[in-house]
Image: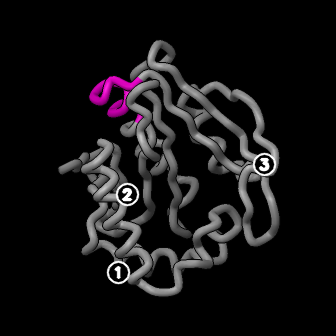
């Protein structure tokens, strides 16, 4: 089971079905902000939707080796970070993440992402990590930029959100480029 203590107030824990209630409460409190950038938010109308998501994430972890974790700040669920399906042949993976309202701008997700990058490159021995963000989501884009990812380009109209299609900025990082940050 993946559990990682980042510091005295911040930890990562493997997301499990018993976290669905807390996750739903976080989505509810953050719904207006999250729906700007995440297409699934409007489809989450009840806790059961997140229970299903978490069960699927656990199954993906068992089947594929990737996983989804909750980001906990002072024992409160603050956000989610996870690996998309791992491409074992090409030794690559994408990372996705989001933070609930009130937790932004404090470095929490950058710290969590650093742990996920370390784990993917050093423990899973992957070669490439990719992060995609809507071009207008400057807070999300700042994370791969802070961690030394390379901006590789833009995919036009990559995702349909309630407000319409958005372009995605694509960031990549190779194992040979990663430097462990103290």
Which residue range is magenta in the image? 117-126
In this orientation, does residue 97 appear? Answer: yes
Label 1: which residue?
A: 21
Q: Position of residue 148 (x, y in %)?
A: 57, 26
| Residue 11 percent across, percent down from the top left | 30, 53
Q: Going from the N terminus, do you reach mark 2 or mark 1 first? A: 1
Q: CA distance from mark 1 to mark 3?
A: 32 Å
Q: Which secondary structure lies at badge 3?
A: strand
Residue in the foreground of this view, choosing between 91 and 150: 91
Q: Residue furthest bottom?
A: 46
The secondary structure type at the circle numbered 1 is: helix
Q: Residue at x 58, y 33 (%)?
A: 146
Type of secondary structure dominating the magenta stretch = helix
Does residue 157 appear left or right of residue 73 in this picture? right
179, above or below 163, in the image: above
Q: Which mark is residue 71?
A: 2
Q: Residue at x 58, y 39 (%)?
A: 131
Closer to the chain start, of discs 1 and 3, is 1
Q: CA distance from mark 3 to mark 2?
A: 27 Å
Q: Is residue 136 left or right of residue 118?
A: right
- Which image quarter: residue 102? bottom right
Residue 145, compared with residue 111, is above or below; it is: above
Give the residue drawn at x 46%, y 24%. Answer: 90
Taking depth in this image into account, of 10 and 43 the one nearest to the observer is: 43
- Residue shown at 25% from the left, 74% from the top: 18
Tag 2 and tag 1, C-beta contact below 8 Å: no
Of badges 2 and 1, the one in the foreground is 1
Residue at the spot of label 3:
167
């Amino acid at each position: 089971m993946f559990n990682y203590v980042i510091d005295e107030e911040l930890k990562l824990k493997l997301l499990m079905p018993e976290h669905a209630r807390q996750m739903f409460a976080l989505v509810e409190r953050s719904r207006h902000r999250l729906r700007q950038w995440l297409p699934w938010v409007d489809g989450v109308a009840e806790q059961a939707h997140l229970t299903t998501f978490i069960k699927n994430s656990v199954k993906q972890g068992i089947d594929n080796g990737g996983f989804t974790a909750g980001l906990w700040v002072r024992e409160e669920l603050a956000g989610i970070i996870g690996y998309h399906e791992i491409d074992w042949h090409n030794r690559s993976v994408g990372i996705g993440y989001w933070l609930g309202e009130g937790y932004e701008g404090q470095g929490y997700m950058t710290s969590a992402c650093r742990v996920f990058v370390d784990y993917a490159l050093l423990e899973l021995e992957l070669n490439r990590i990719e992060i995609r963000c809507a071009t207008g989501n400057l807070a999300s884009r700042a994370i791969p930029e802070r961690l030394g990812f390379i901006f590789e380009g833009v995919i036009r109209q990559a995702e349909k959100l309630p407000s319409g299609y958005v372009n995605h900025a694509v960031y990549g990082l190779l194992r040979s480029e990663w430097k462990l940050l103290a």
